[in-house]
Image (cartoon, helix red, strand yellow):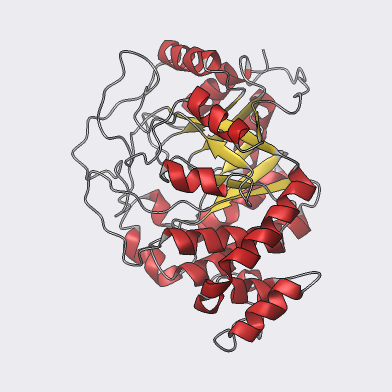
Amino acid sequence: MTPAPPAWLGPAPGVIAHAPTSEDVLRALDHDDPGPREFAALVSSAAGPFLEPMARRAAALTRRHFGRTISLYAPLYLANLCTSGCAYCGFASDRAVARRRLEPAEVHDELLALKAMGFEEVLLLTGERGPGAGFDYLLECVALAARLFHCVGIEAFPMSTEEYARLARAGCTSVTLYQETYNVRCYRTFHRWGPKADYGERLAAPARALQAGMRSVGLGILLGLTDPAADAIALLCHGTHLRRTFWRSGVTISLPRLRPEPGGFEAPFPVSEALLARIVLAFRIVWPDVPLLLSTRERPKFRDGMAGLGVTKMSAASRTTVGGYTAAAPKDEGQFRIGDERGVAEVAAMLRGKRLEPVFKNWDRVFRDAGGDGDG
């Protein structure tokens, strides 16, 4: 039986005790230090007419804390082997897709292809833990990537603190782990079987990653699964808890929307671009210094408009197929359908046209010889 969420997940008493009104939104926009109550007003339907003043405040805060920079990164799908039955995922174990994983030589070729595009940050992705693509495989891939890239992140299955520590020693700098939805009942409905069906295990993993010494964790919700405002508030509470507990580390936020995938899953709660923009702006207003990510799930026009307007980090030239960056890669649909298929040069040119600077590298990783685990 799924355990009840921890108390810190909120919402705090009184945060959404009533449906927010336009007056609540105005008070939130005027607040010098907005918190969960103000955030709830800004993501509510009452904030719909206030998108422009929200955008102005978010843009000013983004400029103050991040300047005119947009960090660029690339995802690299290592394997689509998975033992879970997530109803919304193109890699779910009941999907009729060709299954494969990249072998070390293929991983190296993919990394070199990304390096040639100019990337210095890569995000390595797998399915849930299984015999074909478990921890040892991921550790080897992290070590390979760390020899070429200054920033190596993973988006994979929940792990133990010791496993995260070994990955950190091998050169991993960040862990991304979306809860997908914080609604316990809906979580059980959409995660039909497999290890990802364990709500509590997934919820606890980001804290273990930070305990192990990861530089940052990426949190997110999959917009469209359930009430987006309620999920956004829970995401804020989760991030607040981690920021208070691990105040020396970083937290990043992603807000992906459901996209068409091979299983034909349709969003029970469709999220419009206007609502997505409002949620992004609300996070920026409440958290001025937290990186907000926007992936190639979204269409080019929307990404162009949000760049620098709250969003400070974007993927580019993304492929959601295993081995998607080499000439020999299969041309199937991947985990989900991409919305922005532009190449790196085109995305960078767009940013410069908006007087924004595309950034591929903004820090140096200090290598430590820890005696193994891929330090090299």
Where residue 376 appears, as percent x and y from the top left, is: 67, 12
Where residue 241 appears, as percent x and y from the top left, is: 70, 62
Spot the residue most to the left: 96
Where residue 72 appears, as percent x and y from the top left, is: 59, 32
Q: Nearer the viewer, residue 233 or 313?
A: 313
Spot the residue most to the bottom: 18
Residue 48 vs 204, above or below: the answer is below
Where residue 201 appears, as percent x and y from the top left, is: 52, 55
Q: Nearer the viewer, residue 24 or 97?
A: 24
Point 43% across, 35% down: residue: 126
Q: Quadrant of residue 370?
A: top right
Residue 23 vs 96, above or below: the answer is below
Q: Quadrant of residue 83?
A: top left
Does the image show residue 205?
yes
Number of marks in the image?
A: 0
Q: Quadrant of the N terminus?
A: bottom left
Point 65% across, 24% down: residue: 170
Q: Quadrant of residue 188?
A: bottom left
Residue 334 vs 38, above or below: the answer is above
Point 31% across, 19% down: residue: 329
Residue 277 vs 335, above or below: the answer is below
Q: Nearer the viewer, residue 199 or 307?
A: 307
Horizontally, residue 287 falls left or right of residue 194, namely right
Does the image show residue 249?
no
Horizontally, residue 83 falls left or right of residue 142, namely left
Horizontally, residue 2 falls left or right of residue 369, namely left
Horizontally, residue 45 falls left or right of residue 37, namely left
